[in-house]
Image: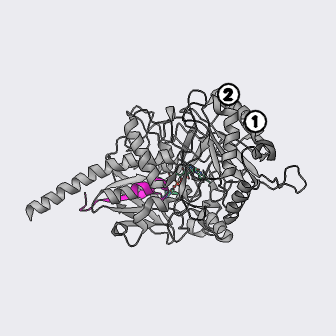
Amino acid sequence: MSTNPTIAIVGSGPIGSTYARLLVEGIPGARVIMFEAGPQLTDRPGESVRNIPDPADKARAREMSQGPQSGAYREALGIPAGTVTEGMFTARQGTHLFDFGGPGSAHAATFPAAAAATNVGGQGAHWTCATPSPAFSEKIPFIDDAEWEDLIASAKELLHVQGAAFADSGVGAAIRSLLAEEFGDELPEGYGVGTLPVAGDPQPDGSMRWAGADVVLGPLIDPASPLSRRFELRDLTLVRRVETAGNRTTGVTVENLRTGVSSFVEADVVVVAADAFRSPQLLWASGIRPAALGRYLTEHPVVISTVALDAEKMERFASEADLEAELKRRSQNPADPVAAVNRIPFSEPDHPFSVQVMYSETTPFPMPEDAPFSKNRWGYVNMGYGLRKHPRFEDGVTFDDNEPDYRGFPNMTISYALTERENAEIEDATARLRRAGNALGVFVAEPRLMPNGSSLHYQGTMRMGQSDDGTSVADPWSRVWGYGNLVVGGNALIPTATAMNPTLMSVAIAVRGARRIAAELGAVEASREDAVHAGA
Ligand code: FAD
């Protein structure tokens, strides 16, 4: 090991940033180099683009994140100028489809909405910031509850999670009251209708400053902090290969996308946190191919709808003044889609769904002026039921060494199917969504199941396990089985069937992995310092 350990991190999203923060803070002398394939979007690295006030600047930041579909950085990313950009489904702003339909596109006919973001901060620069905690069987069975609570508490701190955001909204409270009337008796104590925890910092004017990888990196990107001197972020730098010798990684081979020059960077530990498709792809390309790599893909099937809030119903619990106050707050940042957001959390056995209910003064789609409920005075809610997908070996991504993708990596084919088990839960969720809608008002968009891949919460493709039995890629501390100094991170580690937004859980898993590395490398450092002092 070199004098001061070097840690190479692949990917600058919330998970790579968690490792960076905890390893710089936790290991005296350690140096962290973070490699990010995409460009830096904001002056403060990794900031949520939702905080950008100017709509044109915000749109440009989103376009720069769209990898193969990006106009602005197409040349820098090495994407052929003629690449066809439209697939069958439009990816969410800031993301790009894997199966985009042009040369080098992945094959994902059964998972068509699979998407990624390629920019500093990763998807965490675009996310909605919903941060519920996993519960019941969503949790990892081999981490005990006391440790788990501690990991979640640390994850909440890193992500600036607020438990009661928008709790002061009268409109939000009325929506909760109506939903509680409908469902309250069926939900267990502690798992009823409530506000949705979100990651961000409330501002004095009532708006939010949304959290991105920037808040996770914290002092590492503050030039006034001495910790920042041991952290380096290289954007537009693509990690081509994780290099290994025997059962250790020795570092990474990287390509500077500005110059096209490749080089080897030696590292004592490599952390791969490059999302649930591109991380397994990078391992595969590096010859690291555990049997479970890319398999057991899960996500959240999502049933969504939009409802016009009924004035008579709302007025039972909220006043005109509440509505005025809500509209005033919304007008401060009308481009921000998140306001007065409520939820019904996952609970077992009777409510295996994570329900999100977002208030909005407009619909997310244009409505003709003369359509019924267009310009509805009390506004609308966009509601979604998130469901479980039960893990199966046959759902997943495979890689073809003989077919390079647009970046020159072994191309991906994603195969995925819902089974009778999911279909039964989808039917149940749809019926409940109808009840929720009728309790609140009138549907202006009927409940519908989104195409596979729409959740953006891809899990299981590098799942963690208790033993190396071929059904997992990583050990309980996120180290790839057989490689003591190669760590993987992200939603791909989650081995369970979950219904909730996964980032908080993945940060908690990363905290555990980082603490283990810090304990091991920190101990080596401490004993070296002792030896130096003893010799002095
Ligand atoms: P990412 O954030 O995806 O970052 C991975 C990074 O790795 C990317 O920047 C990528 O460019 C980089 N990379 C890939 N390959 C390489 C390579 N070879 N070399 C160098 N760099 C590489 N989650 C929630 O929990 N709640 C939500 O409300 C929520 N809403 C969302 C809304 C939207 C619109 C989107 C897009 C996502 C949302 N998510 C949400 C998902 C959330 O953003 C992700 O769970 C989270 O960002 C995952 O973090 P990560 O660090 O593992 O990966």
Task: Tell me if mark 2 has few (under 14), some (14-19) or many (20+) residues whose alpha carbon lies within 10 angstroms of its own.
Answer: few
- Report the mark closest to the observer, 2 or 1: 1
The dot on residue 434 is 1
State the extent of the magenta-drawn residues as a range.
1-20
The dot on residue 530 is none
State the residue in front, 325 or 413: 325
Q: Assess mark 1: CB under 8 A from ligand 1?
A: no
State the residue in front, 319 or 452: 319
Q: Residue at (55%, 62%) from the top-left corner?
A: 119
The dot on residue 424 is 2
Q: Is residue 468 left or right of residue 506?
A: left
How many numbered marks have been drawn onto this rendered protein structure?
A: 2
Q: Amino acid at mark 1?
A: Arg
Q: Residue at (55%, 69%) from the top-left corner?
A: 42
When asked about the image quadrant of residue 302, the answer is top right
Q: Amino acid at mark 2?
A: Ala
Residue 363 counted in the magenta span: no
